Image (cartoon, helix red, strand yellow):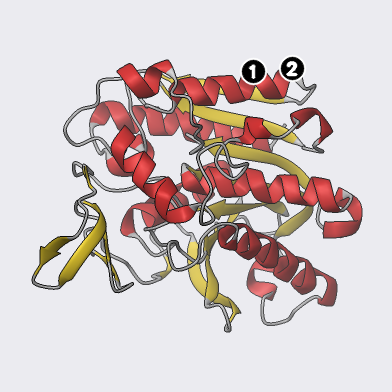
């Protein structure tokens, strides 16, 4: 759930008044929810437009998927002439409540990933909570995939600029933090409700890549209780709780299946191979490790990678030399996973 480099300390006063009204929920620097229902999101991360063909040869373009729900996606198509390459459908982070496919940090990360991992990336701009609580984001993910399927079936001339390079038998779902939660839940819906072949044909879901997946539960893990976070951490426990209060269905607690994947029987799920990317200094570390263990115990194919010395959302928010080395490691793991 990539946020931004500020201290997202939760302020949850009952009836805290300011010049704009009474605030009932606030994550500093990111979002304010007022008693009258108004939502204020602070533009702390800039949105950037598509640049057409970038210096790295990646073509970036926005495409409307559903005008009614304002569902759209930003495509990144690397320059691999004459090749059919994998399609990676990506969901941004932001605790389900903030973030955009147009955020500058995602734009740069995903363009770089498309070029170096050799894949087409479709970055989904899904509806946000609390205006659209879960499972709205999951619905948008399914609708985006069905749109891709339709374009492939009809051989859309309008979308030929990326369809012509797409290997339909090599589809991947990916995301970071809340986006990883969405990718996982979209995949479980596909596996639970319909067979993979009939639901997506001619597309074939080959794998899922989850970066620091944003899961939770009523019982705290050791890393949630004890992990010491730097002042500019992208996620702490109070902010995590606030995101869940704003995004879960009304009346649900953190053991709801949208939040806690272990609330369901994993053995009954049909899932492709899963790659889980975990940060050593993330409060979600233990929960992510428990998730991997549960998948493996249920007979699922799961790989996990732990990135030492970095915290939540380092891949988009920390520009230090050390973090950039870890980003290149992550991209290498992506490339190996999608080409295996």
For the residue pair 110 and 1, the one nearer the viewer reads as 1
Residue 141 horizontal side relative to residue 277, left or right: right
Q: Which residue appears at 45% of the width and 63% of the height?
A: 128
Residue 293 disc label: 1
- Residue at the (52%, 64%) spot, across then down: 126
- The CA span between labels 2 and 1 is 6 Å
Q: In the picture provided, is 58 more to the left or to the right than 119?
A: left
Q: Position of residue 25 (x, y in %)?
A: 27, 56
| Res 236 visible | no
Image coordinates for residue 186, horizontal then vertical, percent: 68, 51
Q: Position of residue 83 (x, y in %)?
A: 71, 54
User: Which residue was labeled with disc 2?
Assistant: 297
How many neighbours does mark 2 have within 10 angstroms: few (below 14), some (14-19), or many (20 or more)?
A: few
Q: Quadrant of the C terminus?
A: top right
Residue 332 lies left or right of residue 200; in this view the side is left
Along the horizontal axis of the image, is 173 left or right of 30? right
Picture layout, residue 198 above or below residue 216:
below
Q: Could you say where residue 144 lies in the image, as x and y percent from the top left?
A: 66, 66
Q: Nearer the viewer, residue 327 or 199?
A: 199
Quarter of the figure that contains the N terminus? top left
């Amino acid at each position: 759930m990539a946020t931004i480099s500020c201290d997202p300390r939760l302020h949850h006063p009952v009836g805290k008044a300011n010049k704009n009204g009474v605030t009932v929920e606030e994550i500093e620097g990111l979002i304010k929810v007022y008693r009258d229902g108004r939502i204020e999101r602070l533009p702390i991360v800039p949105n950037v437009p598509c640049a057409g063909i970038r210096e790295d040869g990646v073509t970036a373009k926005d495409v409307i998927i559903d005008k009614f729900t304002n569902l759209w996606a930003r495509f990144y198509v690397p320059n691999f002439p004459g090749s059919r390459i994998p399609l990676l459908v990506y969901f941004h982070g932001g605790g389900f409540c903030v973030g955009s496919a147009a955020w500058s940090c995602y734009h740069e990360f995903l363009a770089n990933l498309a070029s170096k991992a050799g894949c087409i990336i479709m970055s989904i701009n899904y509806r946000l909570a609390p205006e659209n609580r879960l499972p709205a984001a999951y619905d948008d993910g399914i609708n985006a995939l069905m749109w891709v399927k339709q374009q492939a079936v009809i051989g859309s001339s309008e979308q030929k600029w990326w369809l012509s390079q797409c290997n339909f038998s090599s589809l991947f779902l990916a995301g970071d933090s809340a986006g990883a939660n969405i990718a996982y839940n979209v995949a479980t819906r596909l596996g639970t409700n319909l067979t993979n072949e009939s639901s997506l044909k001619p597309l074939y879901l080959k794998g899922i890549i989850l970066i620091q997946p944003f899961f939770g539960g009523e019982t705290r893990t050791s890393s949630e209780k004890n992990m010491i976070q730097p002042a500019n951490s992208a996620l702490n426990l109070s902010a995590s709780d606030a995101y869940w209060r704003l995004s879960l269905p009304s009346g649900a607690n953190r053991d709801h299946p949208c939040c806690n994947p272990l609330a369901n029987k994993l053995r009954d799920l049909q899932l492709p191979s899963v790659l889980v990317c975990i940060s050593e200094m993330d409060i979600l570390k233990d929960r992510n490790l428990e998730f991997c263990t549960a998948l493996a115990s249920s007979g699922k194919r799961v790989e996990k990678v732990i990135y030492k010395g970095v915290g939540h959302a380092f891949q988009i928010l920390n520009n230090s030399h050390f973090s950039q080395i870890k980003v290149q490691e992550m991209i290498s793991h992506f490339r190996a996973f999608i080409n295996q």
